[in-house]
């Protein structure tokens, strides 16, 4: 058997294994989509809630203005801050222009929700694919890996939906003025939201990915630590694909923060550099 044949066979085996894992993942996501179908309406209502203008930012602003009113009543009256505080929720609705647009939006929401429901199976299949390259001791970490990966993705998605999404929509609505009103398209609004949900979920997976690469010996603490400037640059490049500055910042900041967390995780839990035999012998003398 030639060396080229020996190289091709393992490659084909890896492709066959990868195909098997992908088929299981697709089946799990389809089942998850079916389970999430009836929840898509509630999810849509949740992501459109910031359109009323009443978010946690409104509560923070109200407390701040009340404090200004108590301490500096002249400033409070001069800038008419009471008008800002007393603003009633506005009725804004999404709009669609194609006959089947709401149906396809519901499909997209259900797919993403189904993917999140299937995350334990997805990460388990990923683990099964990479397990042959791990030691016997590391293979026992399957449950912590699946659990932590699933929780990390969900935390990233919830962090975006609860904290970041209201900021983005609030910033967008701040441009409303006399003769200028928001008219959000349903597909554009939901596509933007779902894309960022996935992005934030993946951003929160970065520390786990780096820890795995460290256990494989691909990256080290020293490598990550000395490349912080390039990580900041890469975070800026990824964020630059989004048009407005607010969205760019809310992507860049968590992405770089996850890199910093990765650096410290690799330092604490990463694979330790083996001490050369010659140095060990010299130390013993």
Image (tube, rainbow, N blue to C red):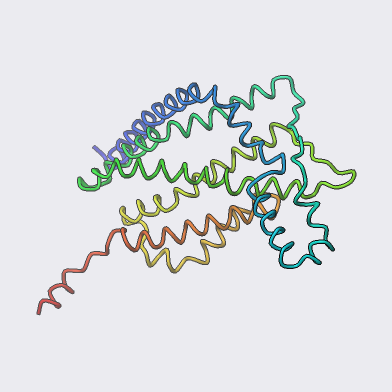
Residue 244, percent across and down?
Answer: 71, 52
Q: Number of callouts in the render?
A: 0
Residue at the top extreme?
99
Q: Tell which of 112 and 275 is nearer to you.
A: 112
Q: Tell which of 68 and 4 is nearer to you.
A: 68
Q: From the viewer's perspective, is 175 left or right of 197?
A: right
Depicted 134 relative to depicted 111: above or below: below
Q: Tell which of 247 and 174 is nearer to you.
A: 174
Quadrant for the C terminus, please.
bottom left
Which residue occupies 58% across, 31% down?
Answer: 43
Which residue occupies 54% across, 41% down?
Answer: 198
Residue 184, percent across and down?
Answer: 75, 36
Q: Quadrant of residue 23?
A: top left
Residue 26, percent across and down?
Answer: 44, 27
Quadrant for the N terminus, please.
top left
Residue at the left extreme?
285
Which residue occupies 77% across, 48% down?
Answer: 86
Depicted 170 relative to depicted 267: above or below: above
Residue at the right extreme?
179
Q: From the viewer's perspective, is 272 left or right of 98?
A: left
């Amino acid at each position: 058997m030639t060396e080229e044949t020996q190289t091709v066979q393992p490659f084909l085996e890896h492709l066959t294994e990868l195909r098997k894992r992908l088929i299981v993942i697709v089946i799990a996501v389809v089942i998850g989509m079916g389970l999430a179908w009836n929840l898509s309406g509630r999810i849509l209502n949740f992501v459109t809630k910031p359109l009323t203008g009443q978010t946690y930012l409104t509560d923070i602003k109200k407390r701040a203005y009340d404090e200004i009113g108590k301490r500096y009543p002249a400033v409070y009256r001069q800038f008419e801050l009471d008008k800002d505080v007393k603003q009633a929720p506005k009725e804004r609705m999404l709009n669609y222009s194609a006959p089947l647009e709401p149906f396809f939006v519901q499909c997209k929401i259900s797919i993403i929700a189904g993917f999140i429901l299937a995350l334990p199976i997805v990460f388990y299949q990923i683990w099964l694919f990479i397990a042959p390259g791990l030691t016997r001791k590391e293979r026992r970490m399957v449950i912590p890996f699946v659990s932590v990966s699933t929780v990390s993705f969900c935390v990233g998605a919830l962090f975006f939906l609860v904290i970041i999404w209201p900021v983005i929509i609030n910033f967008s609505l701040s441009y409303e003025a006399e003769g200028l009103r928001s008219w959000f398209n349903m597909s554009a609004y939901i596509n933007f939201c779902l894309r960022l949900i996935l992005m934030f979920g993946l951003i929160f997976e970065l520390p786990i990915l780096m820890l795995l690469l460290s256990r494989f010996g691909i990256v080290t603490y020293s490598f990550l630590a000395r490349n912080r400037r390039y990580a900041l640059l890469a975070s800026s490049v990824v964020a630059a694909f989004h048009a407005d500055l607010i969205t760019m910042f809310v992507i860049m900041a968590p992405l770089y923060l996850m890199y910093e967390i990765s650096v410290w995780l690799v330092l604490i839990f990463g694979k330790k550099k083996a001490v050369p035999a010659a140095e060990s012998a010299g130390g013993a003398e």
